């Protein structure tokens, strides 16, 4: 098969079926309403002091903070995608969840470590 044949086959498999957007939105709204509440977290609301920088300040306001650089980190990551286009969405979603869990664990560990060191017993 020529390169064009391969590309046509892939494009045919990627074509979208028409969907009822309003029905999709309503289904998503119902799923969100029925979903369990998120787990409580010790992560404070972030600040954005500079482009690309996400800062998590000490909730007690002592001046300490933990910085994250999500854009820089994602650019340095290696993302392995499956050759099977039918599994692409699943792979990207799994990767996004893994990144979110790793980010959450990293921030929680930094804040817990700070509290143990600077605010013991709080
Ligand atoms: Zn503090």
Image (cartoon, helix red, strand yellow):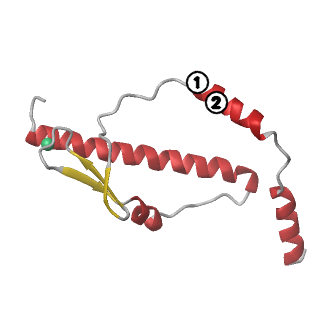
Residue that numbered label 2 is attached to? 29
In-image side of 108 versus 71 (left or right): left
Residue at 43% in and 63% down: 71
Q: From mark 2 to mark 1, how far is it between C-alphas?
A: 6 Å
Quadrant for the N terminus in the image: bottom right
Q: Give neighbour class at mark 2: few <14, some 14-19, many 20+ (Cα, 10 Å).
A: few
Query: In which quadrant of the rendered view does residue 31 lie?
Result: top right
Residue at 46% in and 62% down: 74
- Asked if the beta carbon under badge 1 is closer than 8 A to the nearest atom of ligand 1, the reply is no
**Secondary structure found at label 1:** helix
The one nearer the camera, 97 or 61, is: 61
Pointer 2 with pointer 1, Cβ within 8 A: yes
Residue that numbered label 1 is attached to? 33
The location of residue 95, given as percent across then percent down, is 54, 51
Residue at 59% in and 29% down: 32
Q: In this view, does 33 lie above or below 25?
A: above
């Amino acid at each position: 098969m020529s390169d064009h044949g391969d590309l046509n086959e892939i494009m045919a498999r990627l074509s979208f079926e028409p969907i009822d957007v309003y029905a999709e939105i309503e289904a998503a709204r119902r799923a969100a309403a029925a979903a369990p509440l998120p787990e409580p977290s010790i992560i404070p609301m972030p600040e954005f002091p500079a482009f690309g920088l996400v800062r998590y300040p000490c909730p007690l306001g002592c001046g300490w903070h933990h910085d994250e650089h999500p854009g820089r980190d994602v650019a340095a990551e290696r993302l392995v995608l499956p050759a099977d286009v039918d599994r692409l969405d699943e792979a990207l979603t799994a990767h996004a969840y893994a990144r979110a869990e790793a980010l959450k664990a990293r921030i929680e560990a930094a804040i817990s470590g700070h509290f143990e060191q600077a605010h013991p017993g709080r």
